[in-house]
Amino acid sequence: MNVLLLGSGGREHALAWALSASPLLTKLFCAPGNAGIAEVAQCIAIDPADQARVIEFCRDERIDLVMIGPEAPLVAGLGDALGEAGIRYFGPTKAAAQLEGSKGFTKDLCRVAGIPTAAYGRFSDAQAARAYLADKSFPIVVKADGLAAGKGVIIAGSREEAEAAVEACFSGTFGAAGAEVVIEEFLHGEEASFFALCDGTTALPLAAAQDHKRVGDGDTGPNTGGMGAYSPAPIVTPEMGERVMREIIEPTVKEMAARGTPFKGVLFAGLMITETGPKLIEYNVRFGDPETQVLMMRLKSDLLAALLATADGVLSNFDLRWSDDAALTVVMAANGYPGTPQKGTEIKGLDLARAVPNVEIFHAGTRREENRLIADGGRVLNVTGRGRTIAEARDAAYAAIAKIDWPGGFYRKDIGWRALQRDETQAR
């Protein structure tokens, strides 16, 4: 089979790495890709947002499946365009992608379907939003309704901060994403990432993971796209996973089908595990980053076969096998991230790092300049280790990082701390 993977980040490199191992694969293309992806796929200079060009390429190269990595093309309706052109694809339609494209849409669906989530209000003007805040307790969460590249969520510790966040949304700070605002109660608990493949009627759970959003050690500093992740997530026990499926994922799939907009693709549920059980924070309609990197390290089944079963609506006859090993990834980011990253610095030592046993290095923002590897983004490398325990996986990842020569980058030294702390507590 000829497969086209769309995207250019660490998530896409991990997906390309897993797809390249499939016995079903004839040729793998990636658009636009990066320097790491180029080692396992043929990279094509096509913008995933250019629907006409994507379709033209698929016809020219007789593509059998398109795997859409990022959320923006899905929310813009690339899946619909591919479907109308008769091209098989993995991902939701534009209508189903509203689960990520509009936070208000998802909150309303949760209310209708009885899915546990934070209490909320939804607003299209600042005055109504400010009035809603009048009798609320703090902290409280203010969210731009649409896609804001992970930057449209503000945890406000006071009414003044909340009103400033509302003003930022409606004044255009987050562009069109802030045309509507969702205000939610602040949930207490431990966050986790839960993934499930969905074919419109059947949902098949994947492994759970936990990531680290804050830029600094000890979960300090501003939020980022993710500075590291690990899987499995100890907080998501088998019993908790069953509750997530029963109380959150399956009601979502059922409600979307009942509306005539069945969800097909991967549902990524951002969860808060509270004292009373799991609550949905938000949905994403694509694989997470950097969670995908650790999931692909643990997946024993053929990824391409799983994507095909999802696209063809036959998940009820499919299952997945996972390694009992743990995996942990550490993001190496360019100095200045998550603000303005310093691009153009050279990275050395990757061959030495790759030689560390049980390690894979996924590229997130790199390019080749002759025979030099150059940083070309904010999050640049995902150094991923595997081991019998999270501690072993962590040790492998950091042993590889120690061999990378890149003064222009930085990384957190404490990825996995929550899981390791839990292990130490249980050992006492």
Image (spheres, rainbow, N blue to C red):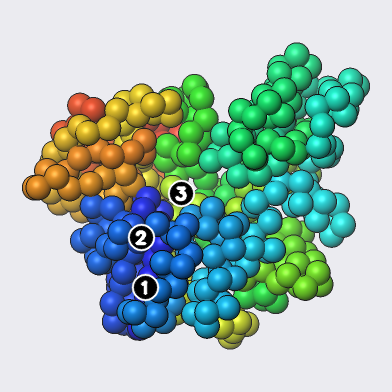
Label 3: few (<14), some or many (≥20) within 10 Å?
A: many
Query: Depth check: 69 or 45 in front?
Result: 45
In 3D space, how far apart are the residues under numbered discs 3 and 2 (Cα atoms)?
21 Å
Q: In percent of the image, x 61 and y 35: which residue is there?
A: 175
Q: In this view, does 41 lie to the left or right of 305?
A: left
Lower sequence index among marks 3 and 1 = 1
Q: What residue type is labelled 3?
A: Asp
Lower sequence index among marks 1 and 2 = 2
Residue 151 is at least partly visible in this image: yes
Q: Quadrant of the N terminus?
A: bottom left
Q: Position of residue 121 (x, y in %)?
A: 84, 37
Residue 306 is at least partly visible in this image: no
Label 1: few (<14), some or many (≥20) within 10 Å?
A: some
Task: State the residue position of label 1.
Answer: 57
Where 221 falls versus 41 (above or below)? above
Q: In this view, does 388 lie to the left or right of 262?
A: left
In 3D space, how far apart are the residues under numbered discs 1 and 2 (Cα atoms)?
9 Å
In 3D space, how far apart are the residues under numbered discs 3 and 1 (Cα atoms)?
26 Å
Where 105 falls versus 131 (above or below)? below
Give the structural element (helix, strand or loop) at label 3: loop
Q: What residue type is labelled 1?
A: Phe
Whether label 1 touches label 2, CB < 8 Å = yes
Q: Which amino acid does label 2 sit on?
A: Ile
> Residue 46, labelled with which disc?
2
Q: In percent of the image, x 84 and y 59: which residue is there?
A: 113
Q: Is residue 264 left or right of residue 48?
A: right
Give the structural element (helix, strand or loop) at label 1: helix
Task: State the residue position of label 3.
Answer: 289
Q: Position of residue 251 (x, y in %)?
A: 77, 64
Q: Where is residue 252 in the image (x, y as percent from the top left)?
A: 74, 63
